[in-house]
Structure formats: C-alpha cells, structure tokens
Amino acid sequence: MLLVGALLLPLSLAAIWARAELTETDGYVAAVAPLAGNAAVQEAVVDDVTDGVMAHVRLDGLLKAVPRAERPAVRRHFTRGIRQFVEKQVRQVVTGRGFRAVWNGVHRTAHRTLDGRLAASGRSPVTLDLTPVVERVKRQLSHNGMGLDLLRRVPRAGVEIVLLKAPDVPRIRAVYEVVRTGALLLPPAAALCLTGGLLLARRRRRALIWAGLGCAAAAGLLAAALALVRSRTLDALPAMVSRPAAGAYADALTGPLRTGVWLVIGAGTLTAALAAAGPPAVRALRARRSAARIGAGS
C-alpha cells in the first residue's frame, strides 16, 4: 500500500495540474500573462503577425507600369520595404504598455474555445487569434494612409496560430476525460494507500521512513520525465516555430506542477529524516532530563 501510494502521489499532482490547465481559464491566463514581457515570445508574435499581414499584401497593380523583366527585382524591393514597415509597427504595439491586456484577452478567448471544444463533440480546430494585435496596429496607423490601406486588406480572422488541429481534437478529448476522472480519484486513493499502509505496518517508524523516501523518489522521477518531455517536444517542433518562445510557454505552463513536485521531494525527504532521527533524539532528551532531575534531587 505504501508503494502504491508513493507512485500515485506524483500522478495525482500531474492530474490536478492538467485538470486546472484545461478547465480553469483564469488560472491559465494568470500563468501565461508574464509571457507578454518575454523577449522571445514578443519576437515570435511580431514574426507571426507580420507574416499574417504580408500574406495579404498584393503588388500586382503597382507592378503593371514596370517592365516585365524588372518586376521580380522591384517586387522583392517593395516587399522587403513593406515588411520592414509592418514589422516596425507591430513591434511598437507588442512592446507597448497596452500589449499585456491584448495578450491576456487573446489567451482567454483561446482557452475558452479549447474548453468548449473538449467538452463538446466535433473536430473543429483550436486557434490563437492574433488579429487583436493587428487591430491595435490599425488604430496606431489611423493617420497614416499607407499603413491603413495596407492593413485594411487583412481579414478579421486572418492572423491565427493553430494550437490544436482538427484531427487531434478527438484524441485530446479522450485525454481530457481521463484527466478529469484522474484528478478526482487519484488524490484520495494516494492518501488512503499511504494512511492505510502506515496504520497496518508493524514497524511504523520504518514504514514512515520508506514512505517519505518513496514519495520523494517518485516525485523525482516525475521531475525527470517532465524535463525529458520538454526537451523532446521542443526538438520535434517545426522549424518555423521559435524554440525560445516555445520553451518559455512550456516553463510558464508547467511552473505550478514543477513547484508541487519539488515540494513533495522536500516534504518526503524531511519526513524520512525526522522519522529516522526522531525516536533516538527523543529518548536522548528524556535521558538527559531524567539525569538532570536525579542530579537536582541528590
């Protein structure tokens, strides 16, 4: 029972964390809010928004007056200049004071969409809509004819990042159901196993030592697994995805879980140490007190 309880404890932490990340929008937004000031994330947003805007830039009408042989070079020149202009404007918005509110709003909408997709049936994709950033750029360029005309071509939902593809939704929905059930059943099962094992053990001090060490070791394995999954996930990302930004996302989302894991490691180790040193220390203290009383009586 102690072994089962020690193994269930880190699994309980993972299930509770996953349930919170998937179902609690406020907790998710609070976790990713600091990323609005992360340089790697800001750069990734600037690149994504700029790419989304440039996808709707059309120079065909402008190039009609240019000889056909010169059009490729002129197109590259104008495209490079327009991209630099758009990138500069987007970066001003992303690094500005009001970006945090836009960032939180974008993620709040995305998380509610994710929660709705997982709770219902269907195979619709889940996206992170960065169009609010474009809308803020439009307002910034409201007095600039070139910028306003350029960004007016971008559709209302034209700048998006796919977070969950449609074919993956049923598989993630199945994981979602397992997580919801596990978050309800695993914590009490771990507590019952650990408590029952300690109560049934003949040598409870030794059982408490092994229970503490077992919980600490199991949590250590979970910490190692998290590090391995993070490394392999980042290595498997497409080349177009920013590794530093993805790493910052992973660290922000798994921060509460890693904190819980280290708390379990510390609590388990401390429990084992106190259980190992407790009774001898108590007996030594009692012996010293008895000797002091005997000496005082003499």
Image (tube, helix red, strand yellow):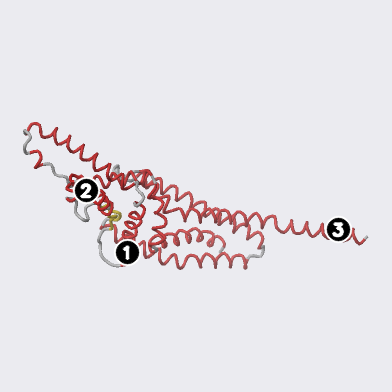
On the rendered structure, is 288 left or right of 118?
right
Residue at 45 percent of width and 62 percent of height: 16
Disc 3: which residue: 292
Callout 2 touching callout 3 (CB < 8 Å): no
Please tell me which residue lies in front, 278 or 138.
138
Q: Amino acid at mark 2?
A: His
Element under label 1? helix
Q: CA–CA distance between discs 1 and 3?
A: 69 Å
Q: Nearer the viewer, mark 2 or mark 3?
A: 2
Mark 3 packing: few (<14 Cα in 10 Å), some, or many (20+)? few
Instruction: Kindly identify the amino acid type of the residue bearing the numbered disc 1.
Output: Leu
Residue 83 drawn at (x, y percent) = 22, 40
Query: Where's the C terminus, which quadrant?
Result: bottom right
Q: Residues within 10 Å of mark 1 (few under 14, many from 20)?
A: many
Q: Amino acid at mark 3?
A: Ala
Q: How many marks?
A: 3
User: Label for residue 143?
Assistant: 2
Q: Where does residue 257 sit, x and y in percent of width and height?
A: 47, 55
**Upstream in the sequence, badge 2 or badge 3?**
2
Looking at marks 1 and 3 on the same chain, the residue that comes earlier in the sequence is marked by 1
Pointer 1: what residue?
118
Q: Residue 265's quadrant in the figure? A: bottom right
Which residue is at the front of the view, 17 or 36? Answer: 36
Residue at the image point whose x is 46% and y is 68% from the top: 185
Q: What kind of element bears circle 3?
A: helix
Residue 164 in percent (x, y) is at: 29, 56
- C-alpha distance separating marks 1 and 2: 43 Å
Q: Earlier in the sequence, mark 1 or mark 2?
A: 1
